[in-house]
Amino acid sequence: MGFDLTEILILIIILIFSIVAGIFSAAIYRRTSRGIRYRNLDRARNLYSNKVGKYLDSGNIQTTISELASRANTTEWHAMEEVLLDMMEQANHADKIKVLLLELGYVDYYERRLGKNNIIKRASAIYKLGKMRCERSTWKLIPYLKDGNPEIVTVTIRSLSKIGMPIGLVSILDEIPNILTKPLSSKKTLENSQN
């Protein structure tokens, strides 16, 4: 017993409708779950912003570390990182924030990610270490000035410039002849870092 043309068309319509409904449901689920995640992140950022503010006033680092520590890659961990990096921009608290970033394990986490094969993860780690301005990371970043990927070289120049350690800046100067032979993006970064 074969199918007639009407039955085949009905099956195709049902199949197409099911696929569209599945895609639509997945989009709604993704949007809802992201909304919940961002609400939780906002709540955690507000909480940690207040706690870090109290630490900056009190200066008691041991109590603060035990209150602020959380497992890597959790919502709380990402919220704390965002709060600390935002506060890092306030020059009057930079030294205390550096200590917190080091003690809470953010520097170690991103230094470990430098070894990743994924270029985006590696570039992100280099960028974050530059934002954290951790002098200790200078030694781990210098070798990336010789990386074959121009994006890695670019972000490394920016990060070493931001950290500002003399050895990092001298390494950039030593690498200038090689950078000038690389693609345009590295040259542009070199020009922009002079501003």
Image (tube, rainbow, N blue to C red):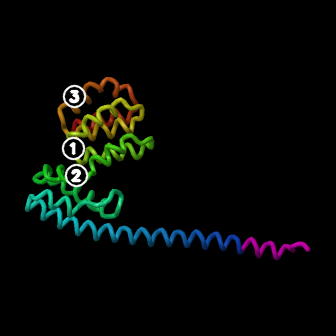
- Is 16 within the magenta? no
Pointer 2 and pointer 1: residues touching (CB < 8 Å)?
yes
**Which corner quadrant of the image does residue 11 belong to?**
bottom right
Q: Is residue 73 above or below residue 177?
A: below
What's the residue type where badge 1 is placed? Cys
Q: Which residues are magenta?
A: 1-13
Prevailing secondary structure of the magenta residues: helix
Decide: few, some or many residues near mark 3? Use Cα within 10 Å; few <14, some 14-19, many ≥20.
few
Give the labeled residue for mark 3: 170
- Specify the farthest residue to the right: 1
Disc 2, SS: helix
Decide: few, some or many residues near mark 1? Use Cα within 10 Å; few <14, some 14-19, many ≥20.
many
Q: Position of residue 191 (x, y in %)?
A: 28, 34
Give the labeled residue for mark 2: 101
Give the labeled residue for mark 1: 134
The quadrant in which the C terminus is found is top left
Q: Tell me the CA gap for discs 2 and 3.
A: 26 Å
Q: Tell me the CA gap for discs 3 and 1.
A: 17 Å
- Specify the farthest residue to the left: 58
Q: Tell me the CA gap for discs 2 and 1.
A: 9 Å
